[in-house]
Amino acid sequence: MFKTLLLSSLVLNTGLLLGRLSGFVREGVVASTYGVGSDADVVILMLTIPDFLVNILMGGALGVTLIPEFIKAPETARRLLYQALFFFGVIFFIITLCLNLNMGVLVSTLAPGLSDIQHCKTTESIRWVIWMVPLSVVTGVITAFLQAKYQYAVPAMGTLIVNSSIIVGLVIAHFINGNLFVLSTFILLGGVLRLVSQLARIGSINLYPIKITQPFIISKALFFRYVQAVASGCTLLLFPVVGRSQASYMEEGSVAVLNYVSKLIEFPLALTVTFLSVILLPKLSQSYFENKIVHMKVVKYGMQITLVLSVLSASALSAISEVYSSSVFGYGKITTEDISSIADLVSLGMVLLPLMGMATYLTAVFNSRKNTLAPFIVNFSGLIGFVLIYESKVYGADLSAIILSMAWGYAMISIIFMVLLFASCFSQLSEFFDVKILISTLISSFFIYEGGSWLQGYGITNWLVISIVALQSILFLSVIACLDNEIREKIKLKIRTI
């Protein structure tokens, strides 16, 4: 059983990692093709608005709602699959049609500061790519069905399939003067290919509209749980959306710059913290209902690992922000001045990494307890704090002000979550503040930052700098891990048995 779960986790997270990497390549091709300017803003909105709508309306809520139902009653799983495809497909088709008819209002709401020309281009382009929403929802239903059957490989490759199609579209568009219609076509093609790949995996489908609705399995309770899961999961997704909305009031290209900076921050987050949340979520949920002491132990170790990984990653990438930014976006129409601006914001924005990591992990902790209300309230409070701090203009009204205000929003979320946790189980979580771990993390981050800063100015190639800093970070991480008593004892035991 353990071997099966380990293999499934490896397959799933390999697919997720490839999807993230392909997204990174996609952003690099966007930067190379469109640079930092009016068209770049339009393309960024084309790519992000449909993603935002899918995440805000669906996110992981379909999986949270449907997977337990598929597992609980395998004899009716196929019927539920057909009904969910039909039910959610029709609902989101109607929603998408309504959005299409009011596209100008949607664009004005999500990017209110665009010029008239940008607004017109964005509106016409998104009229096509908005149909990714029902495609993604139908695919999400099938993904839930496959994962309930412990089939992870094909669903995990979905993001890679979509991003690969977009990258091809970007390359072709580059040779025909950045034609946005061609890009729209390839975005939709990616959605279709992802859907087809999963349809092929589940085998034959018999969609008889009358037959599949008898009896109707989708209850009000199931739909309510779906709505609650959406409300719980979507709030954190609003942070970058609100940030881009504010950036649209600034000079042309600001939306694109903020998007590039966000991607450079989100990538290490995915490799360190988000990945960890996916791995620990099943253990958190199982232990909460079976053994509270084990549960709090997993929570404590998860918080410590999140803190250490995010702080070390932030220190390393802040030190080599110019090398890091140039390696990803330093091609095509991106100028040296653009890279310098992006690098400065990345260096500042790395303060977000530990805060985003803790907010993401603690959200997973509460969700593992089937408590979706608390994360919604806490995350929404942090979002309001972010908006109020930015609107107060205490940091000014530029991109750095957006990043700093966002940091305070995530800090609020992390602090409130920790207060809630410590209030209910202070004795178990007090060990989180392990002095050896905290001090060694601070010392390690200092040496990593200084070493990275020296290497960046030494004149060696970008990828060599990144490789050396990565090895340096792994070395310090290993030292910190050995400071934990349990890990140290396990290492000693392993050595004795050799």
Image (spheres, grey):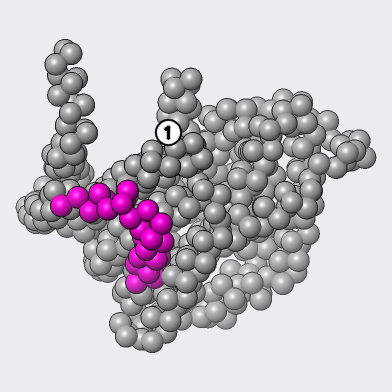
Q: Is residue 425 in the magenta section?
A: yes
Residue drawn 61% across the image and 43% down it: 63
In the displayed structure image, the side of residue 476 where residue 113 appears, left or right: right
Residue drawn 51% across the image and 48% down it: 369
From what the image shows, is residue 332 above or below residue 160?
Answer: below
User: Mark 1 sits on what residue?
Assistant: 14
Is residue 60 at least partly visible in the picture? yes
From what the image shows, is residue 45 above or below residue 197?
Answer: below
Magenta stretch mostly in which secondary structure? helix
Residue drawn 33% across the image and 77% down it: 401
Residue 97: name its quadrant.
bottom right
Q: Nearer the viewer, residue 372 or 79?
A: 372
Percent position of residue 150, x then y: 57, 27
Residue 116: name its quadrant.
bottom right
| Element on which disc 1 rests | helix
From what the image shows, is residue 484 above or below residue 114?
Answer: above
Q: Nearer the viewer, residue 22 or 319?
A: 319
Percent position of residue 448, x then y: 13, 51
Residue drawn 48% across the image and 53% down it: 366
Residues shaded magenta = 408-435
Residue 131: name its quadrant.
bottom right
Q: Nearer the viewer, residue 368 or 35?
A: 368
Q: Is residue 324 in the magenta section?
A: no
Label 1 Cα crowd, 10 Å radius (few <14 / some 14-19 / many 20+): some
Q: Nearer the viewer, residue 402 or 232?
A: 232
Identity, as a three-letter code, of the amino acid under mark 1: Thr
Percent position of residue 316, x then y: 19, 52
- Residue furthest to the right in view is 210
Count of labels in the image? 1
Q: Quadrant of the C terminus?
A: top left
Is residue 24 at least partly visible in the picture? no
Percent position of residue 105, x then y: 66, 76
